[in-house]
Image (tube, helix red, strand yellow):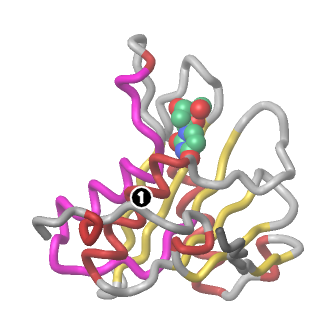
Amino acid sequence: MKHKTLKISYSVSESNSDLSEPDQFLMKEALKSAQNAYAPYSGFSVGAAIKLSSGKIVTGNNQENAAYPSGLCAERVALFSASALYPNDSVETIAITIKTKHKIIEPVAPCGACRQVIAEYENRQNKKIRIIFSGETGKSYMVEGIQNLLPITFNARNMNNR
Ligand code: THU
């Protein structure tokens, strides 16, 4: 058996004000969206803002439910919405941030299921998606492509009928 190692890479900005103007703008849109989250059960409001290749911005926030698993994360609300509204546009960047009572300083990364959905759209558009995420203050992380968050991904190529 051979042992192999994978490297992932990510960029760190000390604060959102160190990001480029367009990325700062997207982060602000994500924060605005987080403020409209429906998160009465967790009190953890998440916002995502997507920049499409056309320049259009699509946002989403987490939508919870008394039947907990029926809720959905902000990233998937935004991605599904972008795909439903603009199926021929591609996703350039998704920015993710949060709003809670706790002033969380650690960057909050997308959950596993959202990573899988980002991988699906990357595969569909055959172009990497930039992912930027932060806590409420402090550092933000940026990755160029889902391989940095979800290496050895399951995708359509793993299905022998694709
Ligand atoms: N949540 C997101 O919206 N995105 C993530 O990537 C992680 C978790 C939401 C789901 C739930 O409404 C709340 O945060 C607490 O898990």
Nearest the viewer among 83 and 49 is 83
User: Is residue 128 left or right of 140 when viewed as pictured?
Assistant: left
Q: Residue at x 73, y 82 (%)?
A: 19
Residue type, numbered disc 1: Thr
Which quarter holds ligand 1? top right
Q: Could you tell me residue 4's position as x and y percent?
A: 69, 75
Task: State the residue at coordinates (50%, 69%).
Answer: 94
Residue 98 position in % (x across, y down):
66, 47
- Magenta range is 69-95
Picture layout, residue 118 above or below residue 93: above
Q: Residue at x 83, y 34 (%)?
A: 102
Point 81% across, 76% down: residue: 12
Q: Quadrant of residue 89?
A: bottom left
Q: Is residue 33 visible?
A: yes
Name the one closer to the observer, 137 or 13.
Answer: 13
> Is 109 inside the magenta-drawn segment?
no
The residue where tag 1 is placed is 59
